[in-house]
Amino acid sequence: MKRIISHRNLLGVEKNTELKELKTIYRNFMKEFHPDKIQDNPEAQLEAEEKSKKIIEAYHFLVSIAPETVANTLPEYTETTTKSSIQDFNYERSVLTITFTNGSSYEYFSVPRNTYIKLVNADSPARFARRHIYTEFIYRKTGNAE
């Protein structure tokens, strides 16, 4: 959740910002902080380059978890979570990454440690995930099916 909040704060957007508005904000930031805009000061150019990298990362991240993106990818997500088995999962700083047998990977944010422990100890991790993870947490796709 900290990651989501920090990206929102960087771009100055709210939770319910639409994709169109997010794109406009992103473009305005990039016009202001694009490294090619600064030619005479190498130090300022490096600073602008770092800032633009952060802005690009924040934009792509927020687009990937936006309600419109989630709605557009829901059929694929539903098919993956219902028809593919869990191949592997990893938990780090309240972000659970699940890799499926079809090659897709999803990150789930703000997953409590005790939920992860229950997933590890479950007789059927896939069943536990269907009931307690897939519909309960903000997610984004991180890997494509091959």
Image (tube, grey):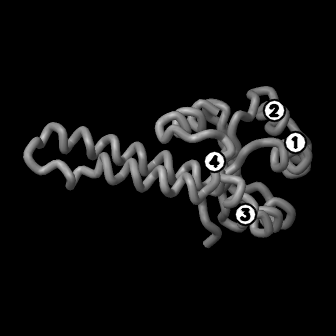
Q: Nearer the viewer, mark 3 or mark 1?
A: 1
Q: Could you say which disc has been placed on residue 132 in the image? A: 1
Left/right placement of residue 22 relative to residue 139 reads left
Q: Amino acid at mark 4?
A: Thr
What residue is disc 2 on? 115
Mark 1: few/some/many CA within 10 Å (<14, 14-19, 20+): some
Mark 3: few/some/many CA within 10 Å (<14, 14-19, 20+): some
Looking at the rendering, which quadrant does residue 75 occupy? bottom right
Q: Whole-Å distance between the Cαs marked 2 and 4?
A: 29 Å
What residue is disc 4 on? 17
Left/right placement of residue 125 relative to residue 57 reads right
Looking at the rendering, which quadrant does residue 142 occupy? bottom right
Find numbered disc 1 in the image and state the secondary structure of the residue it sits on.
helix
For the point 82% across and 44% down, the residue is: 133
Q: Position of residue 19 (x, y in %)?
A: 60, 57
Q: Whole-Å distance between the Cαs marked 3 and 2?
A: 22 Å
Figure quadrant of the N terminus? top right
Earlier residue among tags 3 and 2: 3
User: Quick check: marks 3 and 2 in contact, CB under 8 Å?
Assistant: no
Q: Position of residue 102 (x, y in %)?
A: 71, 67
What residue is disc 3 on? 101
Q: Is residue 2 above or below residue 68?
A: above
User: Quick check: marks 2 and 1 in contact, CB under 8 Å?
Assistant: yes
Left/right placement of residue 32 relative to residue 13 reads left
For the point 66% across and 47% down, the residue is: 107
Earlier residue among tags 2 and 1: 2
For the point 75% across and 68% down, the residue is: 76
Q: Whole-Å distance between the Cαs marked 3 and 4?
A: 34 Å
Q: Amino acid at mark 2?
A: Thr
